Image (cartoon, coloured by chain):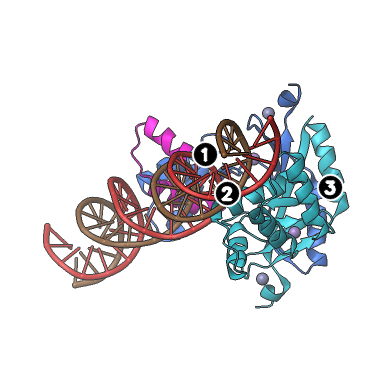
Chain colours: A blue, B cyan, C brown, D red
Amino acid sequence: MKTETLQFKSYIEEKGLLFTPERQSVAEEVFSSHDHLDAEKVLKSLRVRGSKVSRATVYRTLDLLVESGLVEKIDLGEDRAAYEHIAGHPHHDHLVCLRCGKVQEFEEPLIEQLQEWACEKASFKATGHSLNIYGYCENCTAK
Amino acid sequence: MKTETLQFKSYIEEKGLLFTPERQSVAEEVFSSHDHLDAEKVLKSLRVRGSKVSRATVYRTLDLLVESGLVEKIDLGEDRAAYEHIAGHPHHDHLVCLRCGKVQEFEEPLIEQLQEWACEKASFKATGHSLNIYGYCENCTAK
DNA sequence: CCCTCATTGAGATTATATCTCAATCATAGT
DNA sequence: ACTATGATTGAGATATAATCTCAATGAGGG
Ligand SMILES: [Mn+2]
Ligand SMILES: [Mn+2]
Ligand SMILES: [Zn+2]
Ligand SMILES: [Zn+2]
């Protein structure tokens, strides 16, 4: 079993919950790629794989994964929420192409630093943030 | 008539559309405060004021206001979209309190600058962005 | 006055996400 | 092994924002 799946198993069991086959399936699906997944995509992939987890359980397990700190829920300004797992993936923000939908990632540590400043100035205690830049990717600009 | 309403009137008419009483009402409502309004709030305020604009028209007019460049649609990570008018309101980003819902505004020109850099590096042509910091406001941290 | 097309409103519809609840399952205690 | 307890699941109902449909109305040009 993958490291991350095992970590999730630990989290679940430490909480006194059960590490069920359904939860394992969803976790494995989420940990299987670095794509930005949404609940429906996860459900569909599981179905294709022959797993018969229900929609409700997918949503519930995604919540647990986020709670565990192994997965992040991100809002890309699209109609549905996206999820990405964190291991081997330092914090980053997103460039969202309004034409083809491509999502690129970028890191800008100084921006993070300045955000902390802004919070201090406002006596605001931050727990997270969302920075999306919308526009057109290189490919789409060419046209 | 307020300057901004007149600008909207011009935009509408230049597009060959009609500046109807309904559109005027919605515009006046949006321009009447610097709050972050959502469609339902606008609708409710109009109803209180005795105006009988339909929900569909509120949504449609908000779209037109955004198109005109006089109003910005913002996603604060809440369940509904917010709108704020731009005149006399330099660009800013938002601190969203997860407890009381308060939304504070902040400006950090250097962040804007760094965003442009990030886009250049990625050959990405930006048209807009959304930066929300989530956490707890001064008031709510105290508790 | 007529024609055309924009506009509107009521309600239907879509789509994401959450909720409900009965059936099932795991586990600990006896 | 039996039972009681509580966790888990799935199917479908529900909530909610936003969009869509379409018939009726209205404005403006010729
Ligand atoms: Mn990402
Ligand atoms: Mn604002
Ligand atoms: Zn693109
Ligand atoms: Zn607060």
| Amino acid type, label 2 | Lys
| Amino acid type, label 1 | Phe
Which secondary structure lies at badge 1? helix
- Magenta stretch, main secondary structure class: helix
What residue does disc 1 label? A31
At x 80% / y 49%, what residue is drawn?
A111
Between label 1 and label 2, give the one nearer the viewer.
2
How far is mark 1 from mark 3, CA to CA? 33 Å
Judge left or right: residue B65 versus residue C10: right
Which secondary structure lies at badge 3? helix
What residue range appears in magenta?
A: A40-69
Between label 1 and label 3, give the one nearer the viewer.
3
What residue does disc 2 label? A73
Q: Residue A19's x, y, as percent?
A: 39, 50
At x 79% / y 67%, what residue is drawn?
A122
What residue does disc 3 label? B112
Between label 2 and label 3, give the one nearer the viewer.
3
* Label 2: few (<14), some (14–19) or many (≥20) C-alpha neighbours in 10 Å: some
Residue A22 is covered by the magenta coloring: no
Q: Nearer the viewer, residue B72 or A49?
A: B72
How far is mark 2 from mark 3, CA to CA? 24 Å
Q: Nearer the viewer, residue B18 or B125?
A: B18
> Can you tell me whether the CB of the residue at mark 1 lies under 8 Å from the nearest atom of ligand 1?
no
Vertical side of A26 occupied by A123: above or below: below
Vertical side of B60 occupied by B98: above or below: below
Disc 2 is attached to a residue of which chain? Answer: A
Judge left or right: residue B6 versus residue B80: right
* Label 3: few (<14), some (14–19) or many (≥20) C-alpha neighbours in 10 Å: some
